[in-house]
Image (tube, helix red, strand yellow):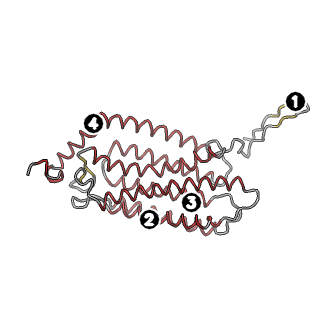
Amino acid sequence: MSEDSIPLDVARTEAEWSEEMEKVDASPLAIAKKVFIIAKTAFILYQTIKAAKAWRRSNKLMAGPAFICLLFSGLIVLAVCVYKFTSKKIAPLVALQAMSHYLCFCIFHVLLGYVQCAKFDIREKLLKAFWIFHVIWWVLIAIAAQNSGCSKEDFYPDSFLMTNCFSFGIYVMVYILHNKDFLLEWSEGEEVAKNLFVKQMERYLGFYTFVIEWHLFELVLGKCLDTFTDSIMCSEDGSQWIYASGKGNLFMMLHIIGTMMGTGMARAVFIKTVKDEGFFGGVEEQDSDNDEPVVVNKTNKVKVEAKKTR
């Protein structure tokens, strides 16, 4: 049997795999990809911070929590970018993907917990339950990061399965509440708030469904199929993945893309949707309590400027 016919994990040592990985990372295509990643990350961070500042100026009930969600999403984007250029270790990737799942839950907390609907009888009970979920998420993130090792026999850590399954459970809870119209009772005069909530929740659910499908696809590839075992392996110390071809790099990129989807959801809900509904960056053009609207005196043709109280 020739060396070419022997599986890569048998025919090559870890040093040879690492050498091949360096060649893959040094290819012209890989360099072009790195330049694109840096440029895209810079643009996303600029857009996210700009929108976060706009939300902070808003007088909406969800303004503060939306501001925090956007900053958290920007932090994940930055951390993923740094990870791409500094490490192939599994623990940071597991932790970042878990935080991305957690961000999806945080977005739901903001949308439903701070919706501007007066008749929402279970709001207080729901928020108490949500805070318990926050604690559980951070415990899971810590456990997943500490138990993210791999082996030659099983290169795909079970920590991915643990965080994904909990996120699947959150997704089921969201859809159960969705089928009950989130137990909201809208009143007259709340049409604007209702329309924005419906549009944001529609985009959130559509995005969350795709995120869940993507991570399910990852689990099938990693736990059920041997599609990538010939191109990616676990290091001897069980701390990182080593790939010897673009195919193995693709498997790792699938997980990085899945991690970035949570941050994309935050931008879709808190930036794109609010702009589509007539808001600018998450805040109405006349949304400040401290600014009086411009008034035109038709008799004297005098324009009275808005008074600033700040």
Which residue is the site of mark 2? Answer: 166
Tell which circle, 2 or 3, labels the residue nearer the N-terminal end.
Answer: 3
Query: On the image, which quarter does residue 187 sit in?
Result: bottom right
Q: Is residue 59 above or below residue 26?
A: below
Q: Residues within 10 Å of mark 1 (few under 14, many from 20)?
A: few
Mark 4 and mark 3: Cα distance apart in space: 42 Å
Q: Position of residue 23 (x, y in %)?
A: 23, 39
Residue at the image point whose x is 17% and y is 45% from the top: 16
Mark 3 and mark 1: Cα distance apart in space: 49 Å
Which residue is the site of mark 1? Answer: 301
Mark 1 and mark 4: Cα distance apart in space: 68 Å
Secondary element type, mark 1: loop
Tell which circle, 4 or 2, labels the residue nearer the N-terminal end.
Answer: 4
Q: Is residue 98 left or right of residue 203?
A: left
Residue 234 visible, this angle: no
Which residue is the site of mark 4? Answer: 26
Q: Residues within 10 Å of mark 2 (few under 14, many from 20)?
A: some
**In the depicted view, which residue is nearer to us: 93 or 210?**
210
Q: Is residue 30 left or right of residue 277?
A: left
Q: Residues within 10 Å of mark 3 (few under 14, many from 20)?
A: many
